[in-house]
Amino acid sequence: MGAHIALRVRLLVLASGLALLAVAATAAQARPDFTGRWKLARLEVDTTMPVSSEPAPFYPQALTVTLEGEMPSPVLTVERRAQDDVRTDVFRIGVTEGMTSGFLRGVSGTGGAGGSSSSQSADWKGATLVIKKQRSDVAADGRVTRALRNETWSLDARGQLVIVVSDQTNDDEPRRATLTFRRQ
C-alpha cells in the first residue's frame, strides 16, 4: 500500500508541474513579440475628423523594435523612420517616466514664466501593449498647449503589427489612425 501512495504522490507532483508549464506557456503567448524590423503595409486615417490647425501627426513608414532586460520592467526601444526623419523612443515597460523643465523671464521686463512637462508609459493590457505620451508646454504669456498620444499595439491573425494611434492637442477632438506593419 505504501508503494501505491508513493506512486500517487509522484503522479500528483508530475501533473502539478505540467499544469505550471501550461500556465507559463499561456502567459508567454499572451504577450506577443513585437521585436524586429517592420515595414508599413497600410495606413488608415480617420477622415471624419475636422481639419486641425495643428501639424499632422508623425506616421512612420518603418519601425525597428528591440526589447532588453527582464521582467518586471524590460526596456522597449522603438526607432520610427519616415522620409528623412528618424525618431527613437525608449520605454521601461510598467513604469511611468517624466520630465519637467521651466524658466523665469521676469528680468527682461516681459514677465511671466514658462516651461514644459512630459511623461510617457508603456504597459501590457492582456495581449495588447499600450503606450501613452503626454506633453504640456507653458508659454511665457501663460498659454498652455497640451498634447496626448496613445498607441495600442497588437498582432493580427496574420502576424502583422497593428498600431492604433490617437493624437489630441488641447481640447480638440483626437485624430485617429490605424497603422499595419508587416515583418521584414
Image (cartoon, helix red, strand yellow):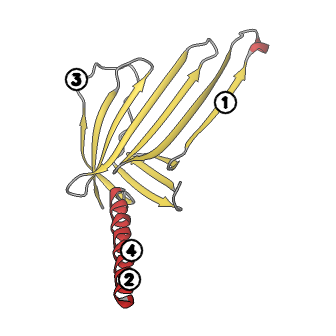
- Which residue is nearer to you in this view: 121 or 71? 71
Q: Upstream in the sequence, badge 2 or badge 4?
A: 2
Q: Upstream in the sequence, badge 2 or badge 1?
A: 2
Are circles 2 and 4 on residues that touch, CB within 8 Å? Answer: no
Amino acid type indicated by mark 4: Gly
| Residue at mark 4 to residue at mark 3: CA–CA distance | 53 Å
Q: Position of residue 137 (x, y in %)?
A: 57, 24
Are circles 4 and 3 on residues that touch, CB within 8 Å? Answer: no
| Quadrant of the image occupied by residue 66 | bottom left
Q: Upstream in the sequence, badge 1 or badge 3?
A: 3
Amino acid type indicated by mark 2: Arg
Residue 55 visible here? no
Disc 1 element: strand
Q: Quadrant of the N terminus?
A: bottom left
Q: Residue sitting at 35 percent across and 40 percent down?
A: 59
Q: Residue sitting at 72 percent across and 10 percent down?
A: 111
90 lies left or right of 25 = right
Amino acid type indicated by mark 1: Ser
Placement of 175 over or under 184, stated as above or below? above
Q: Position of residue 76 (x, y in %)?
A: 48, 54
Are circles 2 and 1 on residues that touch, CB within 8 Å? Answer: no
| Residue at mark 1 to residue at mark 3: CA–CA distance | 36 Å
The residue carrying pointer 2 sits among few (fewer than 14), some (14 to 19) or many (20 or more) residues within 10 Å by Cα, namely few
Amino acid type indicated by mark 3: Thr
Q: Residue sitting at 47 percent across and 27 percent down?
A: 147
Q: Position of residue 41 (x, y in %)?
A: 24, 50
Residue 155 visible here? yes
Name the disc covering residue 10, or none.
2
The residue carrying pointer 3 sits among few (fewer than 14), some (14 to 19) or many (20 or more) residues within 10 Å by Cα, namely few
Placement of 117 over or under 62, stated as above or below? above
The residue at which mark 1 appears reads as: 101
